[in-house]
């Protein structure tokens, strides 16, 4: 039995989608639940030869039997959610908590028209901040108030707690990353909520005593979109020279890119209470690592990098992603 939280270690876009898809399918989880802020996230996976960007439905949909749940703490944009449900034909497995805050067109308008949010903070313009403001003001609609969401409503907290009691495997998918936390991140260049493991418990309605594993995901280099401090940021020419250019899955914006930041990694590990670390995109840092499935198949510099991450964070690296596809992974759990 495991109750695993997946959490982002830097500023989001660490490759959580791929990791969630791998764990959900490999461990045949009974429940894949989406925690985190809302559709400001874009979790990319490659599945059955197709590249899919998930903004609301958990990436754990790849496990054919898994219930797919969205916890009460997560913002729901009905248009985005229904499009994903339809596209993936997973309606019968979907459960949305009646208490989820709904993103309304006016929230998107406010997000896009506010120069503070759009230009200074550099939000994704998906209405998340204004919708959370409306929730705090206690003046907005919840999922239970939206006719199109009715077929999917389910008491998510109850479902998850019952599954845990029955000894089933549960996977909780957080979104964004440590540096974007409203409380622990680089305020005011942050998102509208906490983005660490404690918040993800709250989002889906489980107590911290129920969690068995917190898997913290770091990319082998760092990316950040939007404004704000970034100590290890590299100049564009250097980013291009290293082949590390990236563009946002939701907004299409060019991501700022930098070197791995051990200082933030240590703090993020501490605040998330990480029990294991996952390193993604190792192949983008060490081309020879591409597709490796065993530690022995990594070039020695890549193994040294993994060891350094373990020394600095004092937490074992238990998963290493070496390419975009499901089988491009080194799974060291249980070793
Ligand atoms: P908001 O969450 O749309 O309000 O945006 C606030 C800040 O968080 C901006 O810097 C966004 O670029 C950043 N952000 C929000 N969601 C994500 C994400 O999923 N990945 C990376 N950055 C994000
Ligand atoms: Mg993303």
Image (cartoon, rainbow, N blue to C red):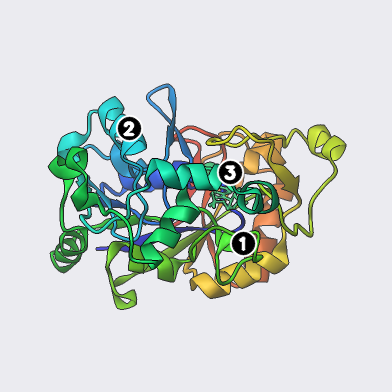
- Horizontal and vertical percent position of residue 320: 54, 49
Q: CA distance from mark 3 to mark 2?
A: 27 Å
- The N terminus sits in image quarter: bottom left
Q: Quadrant of residue 101?
A: bottom left
- Horizontal and vertical percent position of residue 319: 50, 52
What residue appears at the point 56 percent right and 69 percent down from the top-left corner?
269
Question: Closer to the observer: label 1 or label 3?
Answer: 3
- The C terminus sits in image quarter: bottom left
Task: Say which element carries label 2.
Answer: helix
What residue appears at the point 37 percent right and 52 percent down from the top-left corner?
75
- Image-based side of 2 in relation to 198, left or right: left
Question: Closer to the observer: label 3 or label 2?
Answer: 3
Task: Say which element carries label 1.
Answer: helix
Instruction: Tell me which label, 1 or 2, sits earlier in the chain.
Output: 2
Q: Which disc, if any, is residue 113?
A: 3
Q: CA distance from mark 1 to mark 2?
A: 28 Å
What residue appears at the point 16 percent right and 49 percent down from the top-left corner?
153
Instruction: Tell me which label, 1 or 3, sits earlier in the chain.
Output: 3
**Residue corresponding to mark 1:** 179
Instruction: Tell me which label, 3 or 2, sits earlier in the chain.
Output: 2
**Residue corresponding to mark 2:** 84
Seen in the picture, residue 68 relative to 206 is either above or below; the reply is above
- Horizontal and vertical percent position of residue 279: 58, 52
Seen in the picture, residue 152 relative to 313 is either above or below; the reply is above
Q: CA distance from mark 1 to mark 3?
A: 25 Å
What residue appears at the point 79 percent right and 51 percent down from the top-left corner?
233
Mark 1 neighbour class, 10 Å CA radius: few under 14, some 14 to 19, many 20 or more: many
């Amino acid at each position: 039995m495991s109750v695993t939280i997946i959490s982002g270690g830097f500023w989001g876009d660490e490759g959580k989608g791929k990791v969630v898809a791998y764990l959900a399918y490999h461990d045949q989880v009974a429940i894949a639940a989406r925690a985190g802020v809302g559709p400001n996230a874009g979790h990319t996976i490659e599945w059955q030869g197709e590249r899919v960007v998930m903004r609301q439905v958990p990436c754990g949909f790849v496990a054919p039997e898994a219930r797919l749940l969205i916890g009460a703490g997560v913002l729901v944009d009905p248009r985005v959610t229904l499009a994903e449900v339809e596209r993936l034909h997973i309606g019968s497995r979907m459960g949305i908590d009646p208490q989820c805050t709904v993103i309304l067109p006016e929230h998107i308008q406010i997000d896009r028209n506010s120069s503070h949010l759009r230009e200074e903070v550099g939000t994704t313009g998906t209405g998340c901040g204004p919708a959370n403001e409306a929730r705090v003001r206690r003046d907005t609609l919840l999922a239970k108030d939206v006719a199109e969401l009715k077929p999917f409503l389910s008491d998510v907290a109850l479902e998850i707690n019952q599954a845990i009691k029955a000894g089933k495997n549960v996977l909780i998918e957080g979104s964004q990353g440590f540096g974007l936390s409203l409380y622990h991140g680089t305020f005011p260049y942050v998102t509208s909520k906490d983005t660490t493991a404690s918040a993800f418990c709250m989002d889906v309605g489980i107590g911290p005593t129920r969690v068995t594993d917190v898997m913290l995901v770091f990319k082998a280099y760092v990316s950040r979109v939007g404004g704000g401090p970034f100590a290890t940021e590299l100049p564009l020419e250097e980013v291009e020279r290293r082949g590390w250019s990236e563009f946002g899955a939701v907004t299409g914006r060019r991501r700022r890119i930098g070197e791995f930041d051990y200082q933030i990694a240590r703090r993020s590990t501490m605040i998330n209470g990480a029990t294991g670390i996952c390193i993604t995109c190792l192949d983008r840092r060490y081309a020879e690592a591409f597709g490796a499935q065993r530690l022995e198949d990594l070039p020695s510099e890549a193994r040294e990098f993994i060891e350094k991450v373990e020394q600095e964070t004092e937490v074992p690296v238990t998963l290493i992603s070496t390419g975009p596809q499901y089988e491009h992974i080194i799974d060291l759990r249980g070793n």
